[in-house]
Amino acid sequence: MKGISIKNSERFKTLAGICAVLILINVLAVFFFSAYLSRTVRFVGSTILISYFLVVFPQQRNKVLLVLGAFWLRDIAAIFYEEDSNTLGYFIFGAIAYLGMFFRQLKSLLRFKIITPSITITGVVVLACFGLLYSLESILDEGEYEHSLIYYYYFLGISIVFSILLAIYYYYRIGGLRALLFSFAVFSFTISDIAAYLGIYQENYSFFLVTRIFYFAGLLMLMNFSLSQDADRDESLPE
């Protein structure tokens, strides 16, 4: 693995293998289990993957501990998502995870001179993000859901938009493998959340296949990001 020491590379291959098996198990769970059992399988899977990472890579875990912890707590809330307190917890922990990624990498980027990206590209991305939020909100309006759910949804949605914009700027400003891994992680989590949203509120459970695949892929990309040593040293050097 580029940017990872030989010792860590072998361990990461094991981690990737575990992730692949967990994705397969989760896909089968979506097909054959009830929603409750399927969500429990997802929680157990994320527990196994995150626990392995924290135990095997203790020096790197502090870099993404908050984000991994927030996603793990959200998996607990997701099991009983239909209960009001757990619905709120699902959105809050999700927002904490995205904002954790945002502020963690913003701190590194502030060491560099700010370069303004293309106004056109920035505008298109911002409009696309908020257009997506508006489109997804219309799905909520069509159903009989509590009005407070819209506020939860926008709280999470805005934190996702911030993370997407930072990921794009990170790759635009620095580039390289590490920035690419971070961007892949953010976009994987975003795709996973959008698919979960569509699966729940359009009652099309095939979307949960997309959710599981991209969620575990996002976790793996985030862990790979934290293990990239060379780029980490490069980013610690201010311009």
Image (spheres, rainbow, N blue to C red):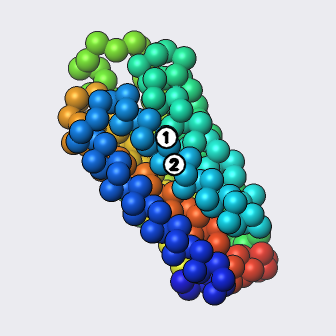
Residue at the spot of label 1:
43
Q: Is residue 185 left or right of residue 56?
A: left
Residue ID at (31%, 42%): 29
Which dot marks residue 150? Answer: none
Which amino acid lies under the numbered mark 1 shown in the image of this protein? Phe
Q: Is residue 42 visible?
A: yes
Do residues under tags 1 and 2 come within 8 Å of each other at their CB atoms? yes
Say above or below: 125 vs 202. Answer: below
Where residue 9 appears, x then y in whole percent?
59, 80
Return the residue nearer the eye: 108 or 223. 223
Which amino acid lies under the numbered mark 2 shown in the image of this protein? Ser
Return the residue nearer the eye: 11 or 211. 11
Say above or below: 52 vs 46. Answer: below
Residue ID at (75%, 63%): 58
Residue ID at (72%, 72%): 112
Residue at the spot of label 2:
46
Give the CA distance from mark 1 to mark 2: 5 Å
Where residue 53 appears, x then y in whole percent?
63, 61
Element on which disc 2 rests = helix
Question: Residue 145 sits in which quadrant?
Answer: top left
